[in-house]
Amino acid sequence: MGSVFVSPLFCSSEWVINMQNRVKNIVLVGLFAALIFVSIFLLNFPNPAGGIIHFGDSLIFTAAVLLPFPYALFAAAIGPGILNIVRVPHFFFFTIMIKPLLALCFTSKGKTILGEKRNIIAPFVASLINIVLYFFATMILFAFGIIEVGELGAWAAGIAGLPGDFIQAGGSILVFFVIAGALDRLKIKERLFPESKS
């Protein structure tokens, strides 16, 4: 019988580890996308300034501090994107462009989440980006008549929604720090990514 040739590639422990990490990250993308969708679709509360309060952005932030680039971007786009298709399809294209930008503010490097100074500042920067970009997205939808302006006019209607946006942002930041602190105490990064040395 002829000898069977086995490529060294498939015997490489480095290749196996890389494949395991890739599969792990893809699974985590799916998990976070599902959690983000559910947290917005089901776990929401009336916002006293109008609209709803949800924890979807908190989970986008959490995905961004755990998942390496570009996996966090996919989780940030997929969960809210599907939600928009179900509830507010006119925001879909804005959402899949805006939400990944929030994830870019964070870093998944380091052994802990809050041990990285960038992750302390990032929720505030990401929330501001979110508010500003959705404000202009709303203005565009007003301009094309996709959303009814009402008697206030486009700019007045958009500005009137800002207090609710800031309340939503404040809640998201607070919940993120609670989640991040809990995950750091559980040493979740060491458990999920024991091979990481940075």
Image: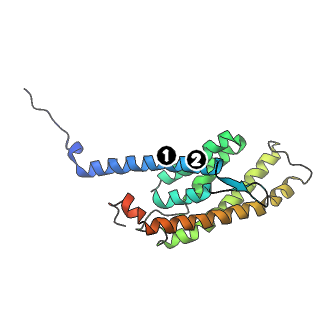
The residue tagged with tag 1: helix, strand or loop?
helix
Indicate the position of residue 121 as horizontal and vertical percent values. 57, 71
Left or right: where does residue 65 sit relative to residue 36? left
Name which residue lies at 89% across and 53% down: 153
Check the image and tell me how it is coloured: rainbow
Name which residue lies at 19% across and 44% down: 8
Could you tell me if the residues under marks 2 and 1 are in contact, i.e. CB atoms within 8 Å?
no
Residue type (three-letter) at the residue carrying disc 2: Gly
Indicate the position of residue 99 as horizontal and vertical percent values. 61, 53
The residue tagged with tag 2: helix, strand or loop?
helix
Indicate the position of residue 183 as horizontal and vertical percent values. 47, 64
Label 2 crowd bin: few (<14), some (14–19), many (20+), radius 10 Å: many
* 3D distance between C-alphas at marks 2 and 1: 9 Å
Can you identify the residue that label 1 sits on? Answer: 30
Checking the image for residue 79, the label placed there is 2
Residue type (three-letter) at the residue carrying disc 1: Gly
Image quarter hosting the N terminus: top left
Image quarter hosting the C terminus: bottom left
Vertical position of residue 68 compared to residue 4: above or below: below
Checking the image for residue 76, the label placed there is none
Vertical position of residue 95 compared to residue 197: above or below: above
